[in-house]
Amino acid sequence: MLYLHGLGHFHPENVITNRFLEELDIGSSEGWILERVGIKTRRTALPLDYIKTTKNKDPRAARGVCLYTNAQTGGRAARLALERARLQPRDIGMVISGSSAPDYVTPAEAATVAAEIGADVPCFDLNSACSTFGMQLKFLSDMRPGILPPYVLIVNPENVTRVIDYSDRKSAPLFGDGASAAVVSASVPSKMVFEAFFCDSNPLSWDKVRVPRVGHFDQDGGAVQGFAIRKTTQLLRELQELYPAGYERFKFVGHQANFGMLKTVCERCGISEEDHWNNVIDYGNAGCSGAPCVLSQHWDDLRGGDYIALALVGAGLTWVRTMLKIVE
């Protein structure tokens, strides 16, 4: 069990539309993109002229033109989470970060985010690609009482468009940038509680989704899509079985991979449109920041009696589930 005190999110202002992608002349029309992945727009920390001119052929160059660092986007999300928690950076006792495309191999990105907000505390990274947010929560929930400081800041900055090849019609329409943050505690109570954690992985399939140290994002699209649908469906059904009494106030947030995948999961699990919280249509696949950004965007909608099921999958292959329960 882990208490939630605040959530924050941030998305860069540059918008990649389907028309923009069609004009890149990579064989993807507006209609084809919308039909295949259900995404209309996505955000990027890259200048649109840079993408149009270079198609990001050399991802090493992207860092030099990027409008934001991961520390800056993570810092913006963190400040909103702290504001909602009614806390200051000095109240945070630990910072944990995770990203599919970190700025540095060394140091831990948590250190750069902590420096950005002025938190001089222990920092480390915990990363499992798109399931990272859930894995971070699971890790903290398993800590023995008394080990953790009163408040821990979890940050997930994802400027993943820097590693996208915009001449690749399979990956270019999928991804967007974003950052999320959460203030959690194992000891300070809150009306918002994460519980019912479970995680696992299939490391024999580690090569199905990859981002090389210097290179572009690459995946076995068919295999990953099938895995995401099957595993998300399984995780969501497990949570439905665990919480039958709360089903009338039951919401679902999944990994924001693409809308088609999420729609299939909802159909299989009987989740109505109004009970499916998502942002992938407008923001694309923002990696591990996607699901927590959805939660943050619904911050003012959270009310007593809600049960929000999180079912997340990622490279590795990894999967994790948890329930956010709002106490009456």
Image (tube, rainbow, N blue to C red):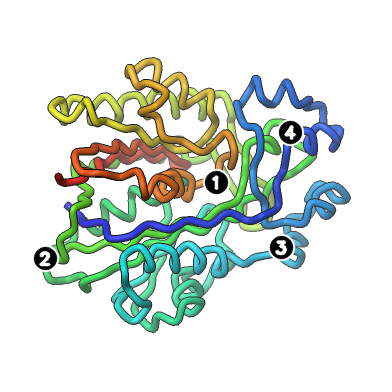
Q: Nearer the viewer, residue 82 or 320?
A: 82
Of tags 3 and 2, which is closer to the observer?
A: 3
- Give yes or no for contact between labels 3 and 1 (Cβ–Cβ under 8 Å): no
Position above or below: 188 against 174: below
Circle 1 sits in a helix, a strand or a loop, which is it?
Answer: loop
Mark positioned earlier in the residue sequence (1 or 4): 4
Does 283 sit above or below residue 7? above
Query: How dense is the environment of label 2, judged by Cα within 10 Å: few (below 14), some, or many (20 and up)?
Result: few
Q: The residue under label 2 is which amino acid type?
A: Pro
Q: Earlier in the sequence, mark 1 or mark 2?
A: 2
Q: Which mark is residue 145?
A: 2
Q: Residue tagged by mark 1?
A: 286
| Between marks 3 and 4 in the image, the one whose residue lies nearer the viewer | 4
Front residue (pair 174, 292): 292
Is residue 146 at all visible to an observer of this figure?
Answer: yes
Foreground pick, 165 / 309: 309
Q: Position of residue 260 (x, y in %)?
A: 53, 23
> Which disc, if any, is residue 18?
4
Mark 2 or mark 3, which is nearer the start of the sequence?
3
Q: Amino acid at mark 3?
A: Cys
Q: Amino acid at mark 1?
A: Ala
* Residue 73 locus on image (x, y percent): 56, 63
- Residue that numbered label 3 is attached to: 66
- Pair 1/2: label in front: 1
Counting residues from the start of the chain, the first of labels 3 and 4 encountered is 4
Mark 1 Cα-neighbour bin, 10 Å: few <14, some 14–19, many ≥20: many
Give the CA separation, mark 1 to mark 4: 16 Å
Mark 2 lies on a secondary structure that is loop
Using the rendered view, name the quadrant where residue 155 is placed.
bottom left
Please identify, in this view, whether the residue under mark 1 or under mark 4 is nearer the observer.
4
